[in-house]
Amino acid sequence: MVEKSDVRVVRCGGSKINLRPPIISTDSRFVLCASGDSVKVYSTRTEEWLHSLQGHTNQVTGIALNPANHLQVYSCSADGTVKLWDFIDGILIKTFIIGYRLFAIYVSEKHDGIVFLHIALDTDSKNECFQLVAVHLPKSAEQEVEAKELSAVSSRISPNPSCTAFGREVRAHSYFFKCPLFFSVCSFSLKATDKKGAKNAFTCIACHPADDCIATGHEDGKIRLWRNFIHTKEYTYSTQHWHHNAVNTLCFTPEGTNLLSGGIESVLVQWQYGAGNRKEFLPRLGGSILHVSTSSDGQLFCTSHSDNKITVIESSFKVCGVIQGLVKGDAVFTDLMIDPRSKALVLNGKPGHLQFYSLLRDKHLYNLDIVQQEYIYEAGLDQFEVVKAAFDIKGYWLATVEERGQKSSDLEFVLKLWAYDERTQSFVLNTTITAAHTDRIISMCFSSSEETTMLVTTAEDGQFKAWCQGADDQSFWSCDFVGSYHNLTPTNCSFSADSSLLAVSFQEVITIWSPDTWELLTTLCQPPGVVRDLCFGQLSCSKYLIATTTRNLLCCWNLLTCALEWSTSVEVSKLQPDPLSENVAAFSYQSKHTDLFVFKPNEPRPLFTHKNVCSEKIHRAVFVPREELLNNCDESSQWLNRSQLYFLTQNMDLLTFSTATEEDRMLSSSKRLVIDDSIAVTPFYLLLGKHRQQQQKLNTPSHPAADKPQQPQGSVTITELLHTPAHVLPAASVLCSMFVSSLLISNTGQEMNSEKEEEHSEEEMEACDSQQELRAQGSVDEVTPKLSKAQERELKRVRKTDFSWMAGLIDSKP
Amino acid sequence: MASFKPTKVQFLPKLGEKVTEETLYWKNYKSPVQIKEFGAITKIDFSPLPPHNYAVTASTRIHIYGPHSQEPIRSFTRFRDTAYGGRFRGDGKLLVAGSEEGLIRLFDISGRVALRQFKGHSKAVHMTSFLSDGFRVVSGSDDLSCRVWDVPSAVELSSLTEHTDYIRALAPSKLNPDLFVTGSYDHTVKVFDMRSGSSVMTMQHGHPVECVLLYPSEALLVSTGGRYVKVWDLLKGGQELVSLKNHHKTVTCACLSSVGNKLLTGSLDRHVKVYNSSYKVVHNFDCDASILSMAIAPDDEALAVGMTNGVLSVRHRRHQKDKEMLTSRRRRGPSYQVFVKGKNFVPRQDDFLVSKPVKQYLRKYDKQLKSFEVSKALDTALQTWTRTSKPDVTVVVIIELNRRGTLKNALAGRNEEIRGCFCVLFFRHIFDPRFSRPLLMVGDIVLDLYQQVFHQSPVVERLLQRLMEVLGREAELQQELLQVLGILDTLFTSFVMLIDGVMKAKKIII
């Protein structure tokens, strides 16, 4: 059993779904894509996330349909394994251990039982040297197989998996040998012939399914169609040019009539094969196109985009579905925020948008267009980006700042205020302020009082301004007060819990203002070091003001006495107060790893410490209020009772802390019976479902991974059985034995599992429950002997004679 | 697939002026018709009968104009000296006027010769009027007396000499034939009752009274004089209701609009101001010269303003019909029915609706931007009409091109005409704070691009010279403004210091 650790760091939601090209299943009903350390299955019609294939321990780097069985899929991962799945039921069928870090997987119809893999030659060397190897997958009944037969096909290939492609069936082998070779040969020849120094480097490659033709995409946006390449040095090529930047992906339709290409422009181009320059466009798909794939019947196309999105497109060039993950672009400029209404996480999304992402359901809710301008997909163009955003306490107002020209000298920025519209259930632009300050806005915050909403912005021009809804004209916002302090640059601003005080930090000095009279009440100063972060205590600790400085100091002032209460030397990169409790979380970055301290402002002793949260610096964090309160009595996890802490690392990973009780709850909820549309709901199925449910109930406390392999053999037969119409089926007496045996635990690869169960049951026996005792005995019974073939057969025969097989079915399994 | 987002034209509200229904109402006048008279126009009076002709008293004549004619229908010229205060009777058939020599004449509208002459005043009579019974005439004169005359017998009924200075304002009551109000240069407004034969109410205006006016209910009285307009409540015994000071010169005339009883005042400062019912100025008419007299037609059909330079300016209301006339002449497209065809069809309950994609209509420059035709888009934005009437559109397209990084490409390779266009654009809008930043950027690029060829074209060169002059002037202006700002700053700081000193002194005393 896993040792009960109280609080641990969990990677949550919104992993990348655009790393590798998505796959459309043969019946065009499912889209599969590699997402983090799992493979996600989506429905093409409803765009819903159906389930994920979990089992890899590292990033999944490639998926490919099994050419022998179209209901199965291979996935390869950086953990060095190739797994074979039944993706409809989400069952792991086999695991092949390769032992190298794998980067891509290819299959070929002509090569049964062979997969082609990208592996890195030297795992730690700087010059990335990749090799394409063919692996013969051994046929064995076991769950985990070690695949040893590796044969190198070509070396020194590009790490980009779209630079490898497989051609027509007969010549598959030769193509397949040629492709990489060809790749290198051509690049040399092109470099030699080209005079103007155009960027000829290959970016992607595709093979025509029926013709001797290879299409290559280039960095300068050209597409070249190569023919006649079987005879060396006699090849010919034709060039087509539409893209103005690198061609990211190329794909032939299954019949080979069209060629699809995509690039940074976010335009899907369909070239008619053999018809010269005739092409169709599908513009403005959003985000540059990274991969294109087609279904096997050519009716659906799938594009994956740089903004973590998969678009499903019909062959008539109509978008019919969008699967959107959490958008994590190059950088998140805004703070992580929580929309007080929907409790959704709000951060930068598509360029010029804010995205609302439901953390509970791990689902993208919607994008709010802030900039409202046509986004031009072009490399190196400086465009407006949302850099700041803030919600007021009731979620009625949203303030955003968009900025353009961060690099150049002429900075443009716009402050916008959005009102929530009850009717349309979204935010509507209320006021646009084009010249709010004369220089960049550094921070802003809303007052937290219920009656009047006020926005305070601080800018590099040395002023802070208070904005409120216009005095004479009720609907619009206007400037109410302009404050400054000795021409210093204000850095942070924060309202106290009841909005009776405003703290603005001017480098080393913190000034306290009264928002009612705009009087400077007092100044607090604790040199040396510029104030980096500033926040008021909440609830009972609202008399405290906490600040962090650049010189590794965390200070806490008592505002009643205006004196420093305590201070401690710690390098804090992010200070985040919990709005629902007194707790304040501080992330400190020291010696290449981040630690978390949770403390209450009234005592300098931390409530909770978590060393080595991650190895990167953390700049964004947020407390998300929980739907239902946890009741952890444990002192170390008590701070997570009301709200959950999410944070974003520099690598744009969204992490959170989870407690043991929470995990238990999650586990039980995930055990719900999933009624997917793949199995018809018949009385028979329902009976089986009930049975399975019982089984799951019994297994709940056990390890989740352990009970997984129990199902596979059974479910394949069961689904087959359930799919066949009743009148076609043989007599029930004939089927019975097969059916029952399918439900039995197969004796291959079950030892470990049963052992675990044994352990588990032993533990439970300590609890002295007679019922459990009975069940434990049952399981022991079943597992102990290694039955010989003859014995097994006899057992089957005994079962067959059993007349009331229904009862047997239920009894046979504890 | 997201649709093309059209470029957004920033709407920037104008400061200070708020558009209300009343401003729209008062804006709905055509540009004024100017009629030149022989001397300063001292009195305008509209006939109460349709078609509402109006009598204009100027110099030694009284002209009567029709509602739309620019030539007088009739004129009374038998004055030996300057005529004053020509006013219609309630039935619009008789007209009475005073004159410089002290004679009061009564005219029939259709005749030329005076029907009656009232003699008795020793000095100029500036104000005459019929009492509401129509059989008596009241006059106010510079000889400090106010006399009532009987029309049939042409005899003086009474003479009231309560004022101590010239009487220059007079208003008879319409409800009571025995009441009238006079205003005088002795700063008082008096209400006379013919039944008692003396004044029954006296109000101190505080300045020489130029005009008095009774509201139709006759509960409120308006008097103007000096820079002040005062409204008195007669039912409360002549209590001052409000005192308005919106003009910066003497207010010479006032009148009431017939729709909603809005007060209008005209002043020597060349403005006519319109007040709403809470006496806030809602509209302002500008005139060329100091205003002496003003009248508004019943139903506010026309506003006539007389000025010191003898120009009568008449503004007529714009009607919906006129607008339609204009548009119908201009329209050449399909009729309205074509566009609403089938749009008002209401589907029945069990109808299956097949949705049609909504077509997005784009402006021409947007279409060109959509297809990345940057030079063409710039051309469209620089068309003369767009450039002059909607400079914000031009500037928005320029900003958009700059955002796309293609502004230089779009500006390059232009002929002389376009370059001239830019120069014109510059010195028209370069000081507009909304546009100055993008225009400066464009200016930089244009100068860079066409450095070599500028001097080849005399037109462009001349324009550049002018631009330089304008810029020099603006720089000077900015400098002056900064100086003023500096002066104000020092004043403010010294003031603050003074206040601080006072506070400290107070503390010490305490």
Image: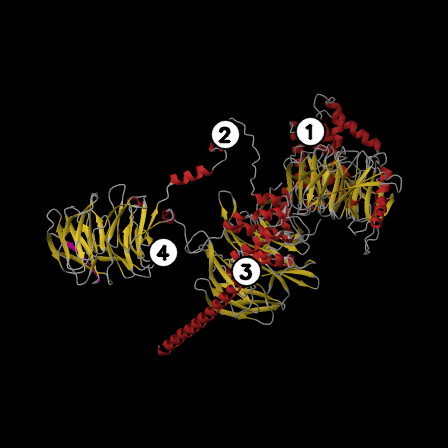
Q: Is residue B13 visible?
A: yes
Secondary structure found at label 3: helix
Q: Give the quarter of the figure containing the N terminus of chain B.
A: top right
Q: In which chain is the residue bearing label 1?
A: A
Comparing A789 with A631, the one in front is: A631
Comparing B84 with A48, the one in front is B84
Name the residue carrying label 1: A807
Q: Amino acid at mark 1?
A: Ala
Q: CA distance from mark 3 to mark 1?
A: 100 Å
Q: Nearer the viewer, mark 2 or mark 3?
A: 3
Left-right relation of B45 to A561: left
**Which residue range is magenta in the image?**
B187-192
Real-space CA distance between mark 1 and mark 2, rounded to the nearest whole angstrom: 68 Å
Disc sitting over residue B342 in the figure: 2
Task: State the residue position of label 4.
Answer: B288
Contact? badges 3 and 1 (CB < 8 Å): no
In front of the other: label 1 or label 2?
2
Looking at the magenta stretch, what is its main secondary structure?
strand
The colour scheme used here is secondary structure
Residue B188 colored magenta? Answer: yes
Using the numbered discs, state the Cα–Cα distance from disc 4 to disc 2 in whole angstroms: 54 Å
Residue B53 is situated, as x and y percent measured from the top left of the image, at 27, 44
Q: Earlier in the sequence, mark 2 or mark 3?
A: 2
Residue type (three-letter) at the residue carrying disc 2: Gly
In the foreground, A696 or B213: B213
| Quadrant of the frame with the C terminus of chain B | bottom left
